[in-house]
Image (spheres, helix red, strand yellow):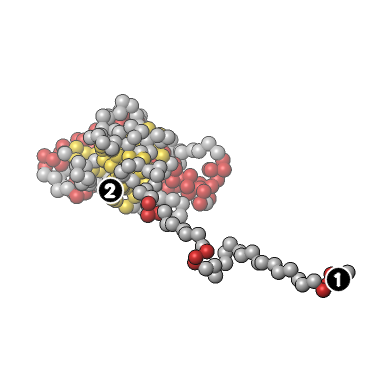
Amino acid sequence: MRDPESYPEPSRKRRRRFDDDDTPARHRRGHTDLTALDERAGVDPDGPPEGDRWSTWDGAEHGPTPRPSWVVTEHAAVDTELGVIKTGKEADVHLVERFVPGTDRRTLMAAKRYRTAEHRLFHRDAGYLEGRRVRRSREMRAMANRTAFGRDVLSGQWAGAEFAALGRLWADGVAVPYPVQASGTELLLEFVGTDDGTAAPRLAQLRPDAAQLCDLWHQLVDALLGLARHGLTHGDLSAYNLLVHDDRLVLIDLPQVVDVVGNPQGPEFLARDVRRIGDWFVARGLPEVGPAILLDDLRVELGMPPGPEASLT
């Protein structure tokens, strides 16, 4: 019998690894690039047929009813960003068009987006926040300590306060933009301007004649009395947060709206609002007695007795 060790070692053919690079081309399977055949390449299959995104109406908090006829609520609507209207320390305002593809249903809106905790800079906010409360003590501590989470809570509070105030005031006929919707720290508001996207000028940009100055003052008095009916004052009123469109005065920028009675500094905010806007009108020819009378009328509307804090000096 032959010794097993005398038999030759059987040859073993090494199986090729799938990632070997030296496989002859004739033995490789062809790989066809199919991306060129995909007509949707670079297109989000879940995105709208046109525009930047589907409407964010569904799931957002909505403004008061009955809504103006120009508000687009259809679920098939899409939103398109058209540019920046204004940048600020606390928020940026963008121009957005919402429309229903294939129809003539479209409208322009101002998208006010409050900054995140990393970028936003609300200055002197402690005085404005007096009298405001949140439900959770953890949120109150975070706000007081100005942690990143606390600043996010504050940002949400500013947005929520402005949206709620605009809803109340608009429903009462006060000259403010209609609040379309709120979602997180983004507000979509009525765009005050022309159909081509040109924003209405601020009061500070105007040089009104005597008749127009008088008319704008009376409109301002009506608007501030409207706030006072709800126990409020603007909190940061000046000629820079009043728009004039087609001779109509419109109050904007109300995140810091102050509860005059509930805030210990409320009477001071009220007097400061009247003093600052009154100075602008007086500098352009309004009699100085006008702001003093306005402050007295506002205090009466608020149910506040006259006192030393009512002085404009």
Q: Nearer the viewer, residue 182 or 224?
A: 182
| Pointer 2 residue | 82
Q: Which residue is mark 1?
A: 2
In the drawing, what numbered circle is on residue 63? none
Residue 222 appearing in the image: yes
- From the viewer's perspective, is the residue at label 1 or at label 2 nearer? 1
- Most foreground residue, 292 or 14: 14
CA distance separating discs 1 and 2: 92 Å
Q: Position of residue 309 (x, y in %)?
A: 35, 41
Quadrant position of the N terminus in the picture: bottom right
Query: What is the quadrant of residue 138 in the picture?
Result: top right
Of the residues shown, which amino acid type is indicated by label 2? Leu
Residue furthest bottom in the image: 6
Vertical side of 120 occupied by 176: above or below:
above
Camera-side residue of 156 and 264: 156
Report the amino acid beneath label 1. Arg
Element under label 2?
strand
Residue 8 is left or right of residue 289, and the answer is right
> Within 10 angstroms of label 1, few (less than 14), some, or many (20 or more) residues?
few
| Outermost residue toward the right in this view | 1
Q: Name above or below for residue 42 compared with residue 179.
A: below
Residue 168 quadrant: top left
